[in-house]
Image (cartoon, rainbow, N blue to C red):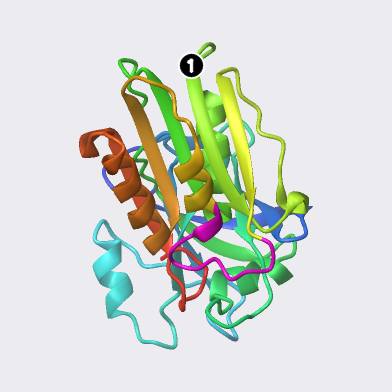
Amino acid sequence: MTTGTGTAPLLHDVEVARVRRLTPRLVRITLAGPTLARFADAGPDQRFKLFLPRGGQDRPTLPDGDDWFARWRAMPDEVRPIMRTYTIRRLDPAAATIDVDFVLHDETPGRPVGPAAAWASRARPGDRVGVSASRAEFRLDPAAGWHLLVGDETALPAIAAILARLPTGTSVHAYVEVADAGEELPLETAADATIRWVHRGTAVPAGTGTALATALGAAALPAGAPQAWIAGERDLVKGVRRHLIGRGIPATAITFGGYWRVGAPVDPD
């Protein structure tokens, strides 16, 4: 196991503790391991690398050393673990667990099933995976007049985590695109929050993000300078960012990240 220069490992060897279906297309997997008690809390939208075993393996072969990424790249193809990027929904150091939400779906044109989603659809307690230390992009700007969160279902874990940490009285507007009402989740927050669920229906979540972009374009946004956070399908994120800049929101006030792209697996990479 990689120890690195700090007190917590850079890579953690963990196992599936619980699997819970939240909606028809969203499953929450709780990962457990003693070293997660020392997992650093990087922020509400903390992203980490998930390592999955190759076919025929019962656990991934994790690279060792502080330069684990270079060692991972140097591994033989048949041994190198599959690596994807995901967001931690909830970190519980006392229980030494993390919750990770996975989007599940059937294979459709423009939306192939990725290896992580395929793994999550069949995950069972006791299955072994690896996780890396995390990083986060969201830092609350107390000087912002209000806050804007925008994303599709792949961004929902981060949006939920951000909302859960916003202080009482914080003004926030969230726009989340999902397939239908069955994919909506309760979002707990102490903030003064307005949450708009946008239903895509059976349409492929195209790069233009038609449903979400249309809803946001028609929205009467509050006055004042906001702090904005956007994530999800890459072209959707680019389009929303351009739209917000066109409405006078400074680019420096917008944090954004493309989690996936049309024509590629949904798994964030």
In the image, residue 184 lies in the stretch drawn in magenta? no
Residue at 61% across, 24% down: 189
Q: Secondary structure at mark 1?
A: loop
In the image, residue 203 lies in the stretch drawn in magenta? yes
Nearest to the observer: residue 150 or residue 88? 150
Q: Position of residue 116 (x, y in %)?
A: 56, 69
Residue at 43% across, 23% down: 222
Is residue 33 shown left or right of residue 23?
left
Is residue 187 shown left or right of residue 115?
right
Q: Which residue is mark 1?
A: 170
Label 1 amino acid?
Answer: Thr
Where 100 sits versus 25, above or below? above
Q: Residues within 10 Å of mark 1 (few under 14, many from 20)?
A: some
Query: Hey, which quadrant is residue 19 in on the image?
Result: bottom right
How many numbered marks, from 0 up? 1
Residue at 34% across, 47% down: 243
Q: Looking at the magenta stretch, what is its main secondary structure?
A: loop
Residue at 41% across, 66% down: 269
Q: Position of residue 111 (x, y in %)?
A: 55, 76
Q: Which residues are magenta?
A: 201-211
Nearest to the observer: residue 206 or residue 113? 206
